[in-house]
Each structure stands twice: as structure tokens, then as C-alpha cells.
Amino acid sequence: MNKQQLATLAQQIAAAHALPPELVCAVCEQESDWDTWATRYEPGFLSRYVAPLFTNNKIDATEAHCRAISWGLMQVMGQTAREHGFHGRFLSALCDPEAGLSVGCAVLSRKLAAAGDVRSALLLWNGGGDPDYAAQVMNRMPHYAARAKNNVPSPDHNAEATST
């Protein structure tokens, strides 16, 4: 899928979760730059949240390490995906755009409901480690809102800048 197709899919799944499509698109751009195969291992997350499951023999080492990886377009942590009902055999399935966006939107929807506002929800999404994270994502949102109004879902800012 190209970026336009991914943005269109993100908008559709966001709407199904009653989320602003421009928010989901901005998160995808911020987190993965629309790379469906994006992954990131987070050892601090492993030791803090996943290690107790492994040391208590509830999961094996492979699953434990995979739960400490963020996956796909929205960079959903494997542990978070499991906590939100993802039952795929392998967490790498979150790199499938539809699967990753569906789980990511479910998680983001719950964070928004818990936080009450977009800025606070984004800080919850990011774990609060980067105080600038919410502003970075929110600064990306107007581009997607403008594109949605014109029914042009392309997430390619550079193409827009060079076409004017």
C-alpha cells in the first residue's frame, strides 16, 4: 500500500472508532512515518511491565520480548495490544496495516476517553516520557484535516510543499 492508501485506511478505521481521522493520521506519521514495518524494542518497557509475566512463567521469552516491541503504523506496544484483546499468534501481525490500526485506534480511543482531551490522551499514548510529544502530533493534525476536507488523504507533506 502507498501512503495515500494507508491514510485512507487510517481515516476509515479512525471513523469506526469515533476518533478524529486527522488525529490517527498524525499519530501514524509521528510514530512510523507511515512505515508499516516499523518496530522498536524498548528494554525499559520489558523490565517494567513484561518481565513479571515472564518470570512467573505466564509467557515464554520470545513472547516477552515481542511484547516489549512497538509495532506498525501506530507503534502499538505488544503488551498493550495483548491487554486490549489482540489474540494473533504472533505480535508481528500488528505490522499488517488493518490489524495495527484497529488495535491502535481501540487503544487511542480508550486513552482519549480516560484523559478527556487530545493533549492528555497523547501523553498517555506516549507514556509521558516526552513532554513535547502531544504538541508534535497536534502540529501534524491540521494538514490531515485540510486533506480530509478536500477528500485528498495523502500524508506526503513534501509533495504538497513542492506542488505550490
Image: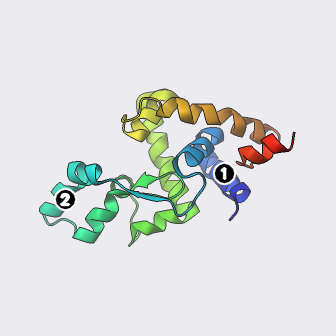
Task: Tell me the amino acid under the disc marked 2.
Answer: Leu
Mark 2 Cα-neighbour bin, 10 Å: few <14, some 14–19, many ≥20: some
Circle 2 is placed at which residue position? 53
* Image quadrant where residue 15 sits: top right
| Label 2–label 1 contact, CB within 8 A | no
The structure residue drawn at horizontal position 33% and vertical position 53%, both measured from the top left corner, is 42
Question: Nearer the observer, disc 2 or disc 1?
Answer: 2
Residue 62, numbered label: none
Q: Splitting the image into 4 quarters, where does residue 56 fall? A: bottom left
User: In the image, is 85 to the left or to the right of 140?
Assistant: left
Distance from Cα at disc 2 to Cα at disc 1: 35 Å
Farthest residue to the left: give it: 56
Relative to 60, residue 121 above or below: above
Residue 33 in the image: x percent, y percent? 59, 51
Q: Quadrant of the C terminus?
A: top right
Along the line of sight, which residue is nearer the eye, 33 or 117? 33
Q: Image check: 39 left or right of 157?
A: left
In the depicted view, which residue is nearer to us: 97 or 157?
Answer: 157
Q: Secondary structure at mark 1?
A: helix
Residue 11 in the image: state x and y as whole percent. 66, 48
Quarter of the figure that contains the N terminus: bottom right
Determine the secondary structure under disc 2: helix
User: Is 155 rendered above or below residue 71?
Assistant: above
Tell whether 61 sits left or right of 21: left
Q: Residue at x 40, y 61 (%)?
A: 86
- Give x and y (percent) for residue 28: 57, 48
Residue 151: tell me if it is visible: no
Q: Which residue position is annotated with label 1?
A: 12
Q: Residues within 10 Å of mark 1 (few under 14, many from 20)?
A: some
Identify the residue shown where x is 44% and y is 68%.
92
